[in-house]
Image (tube, rainbow, N blue to C red):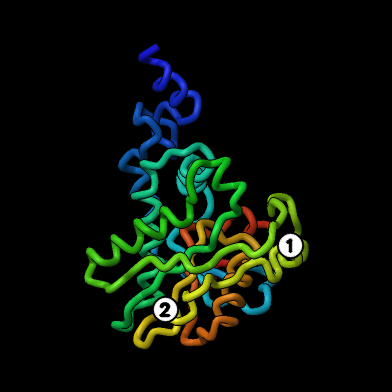
Amino acid sequence: MRGTGRELAGLMLPAGCAGCGAGRGAGALCAGCAAELTAGAVRRVAPRPRPPGLPAVYAAVAYAGAARSALLAHKERGALCLAHPLGTALAAGVRVCGDGGERVVLVPVPSARGAVVRRGHDPVRRLALVAAERLRRGGIRAELLPVLRQRRAVADQAGLSAVARQRNVSGALEVVRGGALRLRAPGCRVVLVDDVLTTGASLAEAARAVRAAGCHRGLAAAVVAAPRDAFEAGRACWLP
């Protein structure tokens, strides 16, 4: 029975690198795949069509290859060891948003309660926590501020069109009691963070909720990855 835990973990996590499958890393990333997450320059990305109210979004890597595999392993299969490399990639995007000497406040887009229960963790919040720690190590005053919550249930976004996603999440988020004052604190830059940008509906809704709480100062957004598959299909674009 002692080996049961490891056997179950082996069914859940990849036997080798979570990015390429090579070697045996219990779901961790090999050096090459880890470098792939941060090797490229951070770029501004925009979904097409762009939902109303979406702030500028920056990402370090496209949603493909090792980045896609690692993100899914962390999000859906509980490979929590991947929070560090993915959070580091997120930090690179956030750094572009808050390089003016201000205190950077990372506000994660919340997962649905049912999804958190099913997964056993909130992946975006975990990545934001790692990103804030990486930014502080780099000399940037950064903190995690999880002040958004779902005020009503939403359907699973997978498979929905851009318009359907906007309708699904419209009005679904709100700032918790007392959160508005923290968002409006002087000398801080609020950066909304999510794991993957697809249609931008979730980030646009998060931006609406933050604006409704009175935060209008240079709102920016950062994500771990932007979807190259959507880009190739003409639904999203990497800006120069």
| Residue drawn where x is 50% and y is 41% of the image | 120
Residue 77 located left or right of residue 82: right
Residue 201 in the image: state x and y as whole percent: 65, 66
Q: Which residue is mark 2?
A: 182
Toward the viewer: 181 or 86? 181
| Residue type, numbered disc 2 | Arg
| Residue type, numbered disc 1 | Asn
Residue 110 in the image: state x and y as whole percent: 54, 60
Q: Which residue is mark 1?
A: 168
Residue lying farthest to the front in this orientation: 177
Toward the viewer: 44 or 9? 9
The tag on residue 213 is: none
Q: Earlier in the sequence, mark 2 or mark 1?
A: 1
- Which quadrant holds the N terminus? top left
Residue 100 located left or right of residue 149: left
Q: CA distance from mark 2 to mark 1?
A: 28 Å
Q: Secondary structure at mark 2?
A: helix
Eye-nearest disc, 2 or 1: 2
| Residue drawn where x is 48% and y is 56% of the image | 124
Q: Secondary structure at mark 1?
A: helix
Residue 179 located left or right of residue 114: left
Toward the viewer: 35 or 209? 209
Above or below for 67 versus 4: below
Question: Residue 65, can we see it?
Answer: no
| Residue drawn where x is 55% and y is 81% of the image | 213
